[in-house]
Image (cartoon, rainbow, N blue to C red):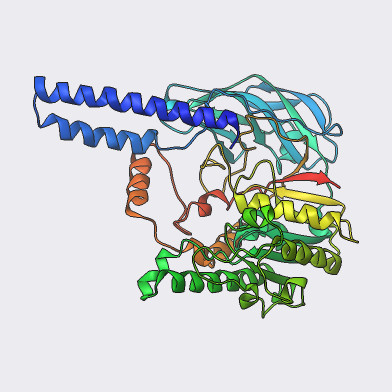
Amino acid sequence: MTARKQQLLKRHRRHKRLFLLVALAALLLLGLLVAGWLVPLALLLGWIAHEAWFADHLFYRPQDDYRYAFPADALALPVRLEEGRLRVEGEIGAAETLILELRVTAGWLGRLLDPQVWIGDDRQDFERDVDGRRYLNLSGQQEALRAGRLRLRGRFCTLAGSATLYALANPDYAGRRLLVVAPHADDAELAAFGLYSRARDVAIVTLTQGEIEAGHYRRLGLDPAGAARLKGRLRSWDSLAVPLWGGVPQNRCVQLGYYCLQLPAMAGEPQRPFGSRESGETDIRSVRRHNPLSLPGDADGAPTWFNLVADLRALLEHVRPEVVVTPHPELDPHADHVAATRALSEALAGSAWRPETLLLYANHLHDNDRWPMGPAGEGVALPPAIEPLPADGLWSPTLDAGTRLDKAMALAMQHDLQAPLPLKKRLRRLIQQALAGRRWPVTGGDEFFRKAVRRHELFWVRRL
């Protein structure tokens, strides 16, 4: 976490403590001066208000501008909003990825309900009380935009009358030879199911077993280590079996078997083995028996950084991908995700094969745990970028309704996304549905069914 985010977190906690002290004093006065029975009622109403409107985790102010830089070859065209329609001054050409930069300002209802921007029949949501520069995703709306028919309107917010359209042209990477790097089972599906399910030549490598946080499996009568071993086996199986739903056979999937949340420690001491934190296992070969090829780590089964980099190098030279899909090292903060792309970079440095392009994805964010905001099935606006990111390109292919349903079913097959929601989360959702107008999909209870099953997938394009 950056120093700026640490400062925001400290300020948030300080304000929360001050608010609680003031609220406690007010409750004591209420009980002493009016009636004691009002105190529990006030506590209940305060908790409901918190769950409805103040439970989101934002480590920035909704009034902060997002800050994006685009590559030099991206077209930047002036746009006007006239009578609810977008008018572009210039030609977008063959660009398929369209990003609209404009100012969004919440109305008074936008402090209680999520501000929405409607782009034709698409909807993209933003932070409550938003007042800053945001980036809408217009990909898939080229025809209506060229014809001057694309409508843009805000609900619970107002939109600036002028904006800038960034038009980025990319090849269809589904036609290239792909390698998808997934730190855990389900990362490939969350980020790139739509892409890999229509790719002509794709391989998927999953780095870890994903065995930790296995308390759900202890209900089967297992001790903590046994539950972790079972979860690791199940998620390793998921990494090999679920891609078949998207047309990727098992002999194009590889499970490396390293241990969850140990990749950063491995990077710090490359020759030292780091076994599982919870299962007690120390041999990565326990889940490698279904792999379609032998890899360097099979020799000793040691969970070391040296073996991980060697495994990835061998896969690069075997698959010979033109494009590698991997986590965004600056945007996705999950420790295993950052380490996965670091290991890939080290493997590339020593490999005889060099891909042309990295497609970077973000399944997690530091700043906003609700992004992409809004309901399932809608578009994906660019995520918060309060601190500048590298000026990478963008590619945002669209998913039709059938592909979105298939993606949701692929997620439903993932064992880690099947656990029932805790009571607190179920109560929070009921309160937010009633008071804040939020909705969740029927396809699954996990938050990723809302966040990942969208009209767009989004990749940052980094040329090598």
Q: Quadrant of residue 300?
A: bottom right
271 or 316: nearer the viewer: 271
**Percent x, y for residue 272?**
67, 62
**Percent x, y for residue 359?**
76, 50
* Residue 451 to residue 91: above or below: below
**Percent x, y for residue 448?**
53, 53
Q: Quadrant of residue 224?
A: bottom left
Task: Examine the rendering and report whether any part of residue 397 can be seen.
Answer: no
**Percent x, y for residue 423?**
32, 53
Q: In the current view of this chain or complex, which residue is farthest to the bottom? A: 289
Q: Residue at x 71, y 58 (%)?
A: 270
Q: Residue at x 58, y 52 (%)?
A: 452
Q: Quadrant of the N terminus?
A: top right
* Residue 352 to residue 20: above or below: below
Q: Quadrant of residue 120?
A: top right
* Residue 100 to residue 352: above or below: above
Q: Could you tell me how many numbered marks the image carries?
A: 0
Task: Examine the rendering and report whether any part of residue 106 can be seen.
Answer: yes
Q: Residue at x 40, y 26 (%)?
A: 14
38 or 80: nearer the viewer: 38
449 or 207: nearer the viewer: 207
Q: Residue at x 74, y 72 (%)?
A: 252
Q: In the current view of this chain or complex, which residue is farthest to the right? A: 352
